Image (spheres, rainbow, N blue to C red):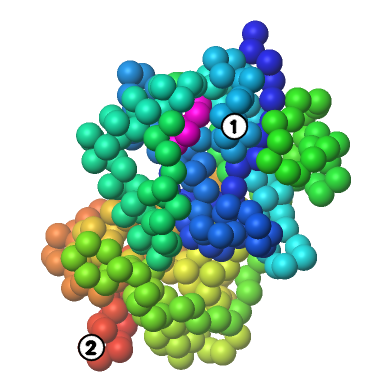
Amino acid sequence: MPEKKIARICWNSNHWVSPSGRNGKSSNKESYEYITGFGHEEWTFDTDKVIDGYVYGFLQQFNNKTSIHRGAIYDISLYSIEKIQSNKNRKWWLGEIMSVEVITEEKSKHVYGMYKKNGWLSEMEADLRKMNLDLKYFKETGSDIFFNIRFKVQNIFLLDDPVELDKNDPALPSYYYNLLGFIQQPNLQKGSRNGFVFKPGHSPGKIETVTNSKGGKNDKSLFHNEIQTEIFSLIEDVYGEGNVGTENDLGYQTKVDIVAKNSRGFVFYEIKTAQTAKAAIREALGQILEYSYWPDNEHATKLIIIAPPIATEETKMYLTGLRAKFGIPIFYQQYDIQNNKLETEI
């Protein structure tokens, strides 16, 4: 049986599939993630990139040219620390990867070459550009240390959602990037299954476009923030001040774009910036159902997807069918950008 270990990985809000930017990262000015805005662990669970049956990744704990761990195989439990304020953070337990092999520098060079050949390094660079992060340190990372672990997809055992740890949990005697021995299972603080609490009001997000990508400036999240502010005002005009809120928290990394309160309960709104109504519904449907019903709740009495495209007749037929066949209170509402107007929901 492989020896059980615990390792910290840098904070990420994209489920460690791609970099998520500087939010939540360490405030230690000497740390790599503070200087660069990312950590190489942020692609750990990008399982689209598999070579010879293995996912290749990076853990800071093995970033040592004289590592005594090369060739070793461990079961590694992972946790991360999210920086909330300069003097406040939250610790999250992520789950476990079993049979993690620490690879050699030669293997790292080989895999690096495969990534380059497959265009995957370019994809990773694009991920960083989307977060407006400098590629300097990424490009300077040697091929011999770019990867230091590998594991199989079937050996990933993550929690559905990371669970917050008590700050004094004895399972984690150190919070540095050390490889820790597994002492005991942490005391996981399971959130309330009915933890949704309505919070009115809106704090506008950043709307200036600062990200450059191939083909020009492009950042959907900034456009989303801009129209969210306009849509919030329009919905507040309908429901009244104090009855509408944005980014209401449902638990770990789960927030509803807009929530409105009425005499029958709550209406959840999910905003999308897709090019067609069909695409917006496809993107939003799973999300908004999870927001209301996961795992056995019913937070909202009505679910509305909002996007700029005009709804087609097929769109109306599809949503009418979902309501009739499955009893899902799902609707679509066009946001007319030019006239700053919400059309009648369908």
Helix, strand or loop: magenta stretch? loop
Residue 269 location (% of width, % of height): 43, 69
**Mark 2 Cα shell of 10 Å, populated few (<14), some (14-19), many (≥20):** few
Residue 338 position by quadrant = bottom left
Which residue lies at the image location 31% right of the left edge and 83% below the top edge?
Answer: 342
Q: Please state the extent of the stretch shown in magenta in the rendering.
A: 145-149
Taking the magenta stretch, the answer to whether it contains residue 118 is no
Residue 191 location (% of width, % of height): 70, 49
Give the residue at mark 2. Answer: 338
Quadrant location of the C terminus?
bottom left
Judge whether residue 45 can be spotted in this image: no
Does dot 2 land on a helix, a strand or a loop?
loop
Q: In this view, does 104 lie to the left or right of 335?
A: right
Q: Is residue 200 left or right of residue 127?
A: right
What kind of residue is marked 2?
Gln
Identity of the residue furthest to the front in this view: 66
The first of marks 1 and 2 along the sequence is: 1
